[in-house]
Image: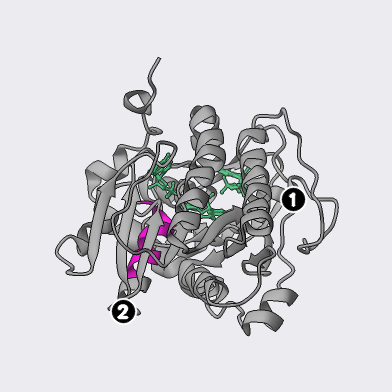
């Protein structure tokens, strides 16, 4: 009998890659998603796979799964700052109520649950690079607080279920990850710059562009998550690529990669936008014998090839997603 894994957020960027990986490893996979920020197209390759089942469901509502379940990966959540600014309450609910439901399911099924946490738990960090023992610097009531605090609560309730109920849990703190299947109009910097380059628009750098990020290619991220799930370690682990770059240098890099002669234009920096971000991955190296392998030049080329392959309609339907059908008044 194949081991069964439930992956929430399956129609999203990371969730869909995780579905592919677990199926390739010989698991039976149930994907769950309500498509609020995801896209059915991301899992269309799995439609006829004999070991894949899809359930359209909002994880903030009670979750029922028939039969045995061995592993759960909770990846459902808006992940782009523009998404979670537009759907703040759904973001808070999926990190809190959704996680509570999945912990209850894990307890009932005796399944191991891995939750997708984030570098955002460190907020605008005062420690650089960020180590797992840093408590963070988050503005609870700022616009990003809905995401950051939902994820911090998610970590706390996960540890509480582990300590109080003995549920087997794992916590990955994911740093900016990119690759094929990101939504072109989700507002995150890589799809934003690539979309702009492909449409012949200027690249919009927010602030003076001196803020930094460290970008991890999706295959490396999935490998780190896979190894963490099967490790014995219950505390949070950073998974990301420590190769740090300023956003203005990154814009120049994208102009070179896309071989366009776009200009960079500067716009206001969003409130509470973290000024620096770089994972300390000493723990992951030691614990999981994991480190990223894909250089940014290679990962960005693959990502650009993906965006280049989108239809003209997709490329020009660049306005941000309308969430109104998901929002009940
Ligand atoms: P994404 O928006 O592409 O995917 C999220 C998926 O979750 C979407 O398919 C969406 O429809 C689904 N979803 C949201 N709310 C739901 C709900 N209530 N019920 C069911 N499905 C729901 O984002 P992503 O980049 O793939 O991120 C996946 C996870 O990884 C998120 O939890 C995110 O916080 C975390 N993460 C991602 C990054 C990154 O760089 N990609 C960084 C840190 C953390
Ligand atoms: N950013 C930018 N131009 C854009 C989109 C984003 O300069 O069109 C900046 C943003 O202000 C942030 C960085 O790029 O400093 C990364 O933003 P993203 O939304 O990808 O993720 P974050 O790391 O902030 O969650």
Where 308 falls versus 1 (above or below)? above
Tell me residue 113's x, y (percent): 51, 61
Q: Residue at x 65, y 29 (%)?
A: 143
Spatial distance from mark 1 to mark 2, Cα to Cα? 35 Å
Tell me residue 286's x, y (percent): 71, 83
Tell me residue 63's x, y (percent): 37, 44
Tell me the crowding category of disc 1: few under 14, some 14 to 19, or many 20 or more residues within 10 angstroms, Cα based. many
Q: In the depicted view, which residue is nearer to us: 227 or 16?
A: 227
Tell me the crowding category of disc 2: few under 14, some 14 to 19, or many 20 or more residues within 10 angstroms, Cα based. few
Q: In the depicted view, which residue is nearer to us: 174 or 313?
A: 174
Magenta stretch contains residue 307: no
Q: Of the numbered discs in the image, which one, if any, rests on residue 79?
A: none
Range drawn in magenta: 12-20
Is residue 308 among the parts visible in the rendering? Answer: yes
Tell me residue 123's x, y (percent): 73, 45
Q: Residue at x 40, y 52 (%)?
A: 8
Furthest residue toward top: 329
- Quickly name the residue at label 1: 122
Q: Counting residues from the N terminus, which is met first, the one under dot 1 or under dot 2? A: 2
Magenta stretch contains residue 13: yes
- Quickly name the residue at label 2: 26
- How would you classify the magenta stretch by its main secondary structure? helix
Scheme of image coloration: one colour
Asked if the beta carbon under badge 1 is closer than 8 A to the nearest atom of ligand 2, the reply is no
Query: Could you tell me which secondary element the residue under label 2 belongs to?
Result: loop
């Amino acid at each position: 009998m194949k081991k069964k894994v439930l992956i929430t957020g399956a129609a999203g960027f990371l969730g869909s890659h995780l579905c592919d990986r677990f199926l390739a490893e010989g698991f039976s996979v149930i994907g769950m998603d309500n498509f609020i920020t995801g896209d059915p197209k991301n899992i269309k390759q799995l439609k006829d796979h004999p070991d894949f089942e899809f359930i359209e469901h909002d994880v903030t509502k009670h979750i029922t799964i028939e039969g045995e379940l061995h592993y759960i990966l909770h990846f459902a959540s808006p992940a782009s700052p523009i998404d979670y600014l537009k759907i703040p309450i759904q973001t808070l609910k999926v990190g809190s109520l959704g996680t509570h439901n999945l912990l209850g399911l894990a307890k009932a099924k005796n399944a191991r649950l891995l939750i997708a946490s984030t570098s955002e738990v460190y907020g605008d960090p005062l420690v650089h690079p960020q180590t797992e023992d840093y408590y963070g610097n988050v503005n609870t009531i700022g616009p990003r607080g809905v995401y950051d605090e939902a994820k911090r609560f998610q970590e706390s309730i996960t540890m509480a279920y582990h300590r109080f109920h003995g549920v087997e849990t794992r916590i990955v703190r994911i740093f900016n990850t990119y690759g094929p299947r990101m939504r072109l109009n989700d507002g995150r910097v890589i799809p934003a710059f690539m979309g702009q380059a492909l449409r012949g628009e200027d690249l919009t750098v927010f602030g003076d562009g001196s803020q930094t990020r460290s970008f991890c290619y999706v295959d490396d991220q999935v490998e780190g998550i896979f190894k963490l799930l099967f490790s014995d370690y219950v505390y949070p682990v950073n998974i990301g690529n420590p190769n740090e770059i300023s956003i203005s240098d990154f814009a120049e890099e994208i102009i070179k990669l896309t071989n366009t002669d776009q200009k960079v234009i500067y716009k206001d920096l969003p409130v509470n936008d973290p000024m620096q971000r770089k994972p300390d991955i000493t723990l992951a190296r030691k614990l999981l014998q994991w480190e990223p392998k894909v250089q940014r030049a290679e990962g960005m080329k693959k990502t650009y090839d993906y965006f280049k392959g989108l239809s003209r309609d997709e490329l020009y339907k660049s306005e941000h997603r309308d969430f109104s059908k998901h929002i009940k008044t």
